[in-house]
Amino acid sequence: MQLRHGPGTYADPDAKPQRWGGRRAIEYVARTLAEYGDICIICGRPGSNSADHIIPRAEGGAVYDLANLGPAHDRCNYSRGKKPLRPVGIPIENGMRFFSP
């Protein structure tokens, strides 16, 4: 399953630090959802209502760059924190092979 989001970008180290919030953040959430849809890049379910930074801001990710944003649920976004983005849709083995001859 390929989820749509930007490839991730780092912030310019020489630029003034930016904070995520206010009207500008609301605008970028709307732009992210319009660009990539509402499928959460963390859990893979529809209904995203926020934008998650692919490269976390704490790790030097660009704050206001669509290439560093992807759709996410508020809860998923908060729970991910600054952990790396893991692939979604990895098959989980159910263990039935153990019982097969």
Image (tube, rainbow, N blue to C red):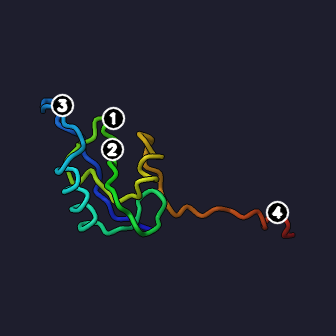
> Of callouts 2 and 3, which one flags the residue occurring earlier in the amino acid sequence?
3
The residue that label 4 is drawn on is 98
The residue sitting at the left extreme is 15
| Residue occupying image coordinates x 40% and y 68% | 47
The amino acid sitting under disc 3 is Pro
Q: In the rendered image of this protein, does residue 49 appear above or below residue 77?
A: below
Q: Quadrant of residue 32?
A: bottom left
- The quadrant of the image that shows the C terminus is bottom right
x, y percentage for residue 16? 13, 31
Tell whether label 1 touches label 4 (CB within 8 Å).
Answer: no
Per the model, the C-alpha gap separating discs 3 and 4 is 52 Å
| Residue occupying image coordinates x 38% and y 63% | 48
x, y percentage for residue 95? 76, 62
x, y percentage for residue 50? 33, 56
In-image side of 37 versus 22 (left or right) = right
> Of callouts 1 and 3, which one flags the residue occurring earlier in the amino acid sequence?
3
The amino acid sitting under disc 1 is Glu
The residue that label 1 is drawn on is 59
Q: In the rendered image of this protein, does residue 64 appear above or below residue 12?
A: below
| Residue occupying image coordinates x 48% and y 46% | 79
Per the image, label 1 sits on a secondary structure element best described as helix
The amino acid sitting under disc 2 is Ile
Can you tell which of label 2 and label 4 is closer to the viewer? 2
In-image side of 24 versus 94 (left or right) = left
Per the model, the C-alpha gap separating discs 2 and 3 is 14 Å
Per the model, the C-alpha gap separating discs 2 and 1 is 7 Å
Crowdedness of circle 3 by 10 Å Cα count: few (<14), some, many (20+)? few
Tell whether label 1 touches label 2 (CB within 8 Å).
Answer: yes
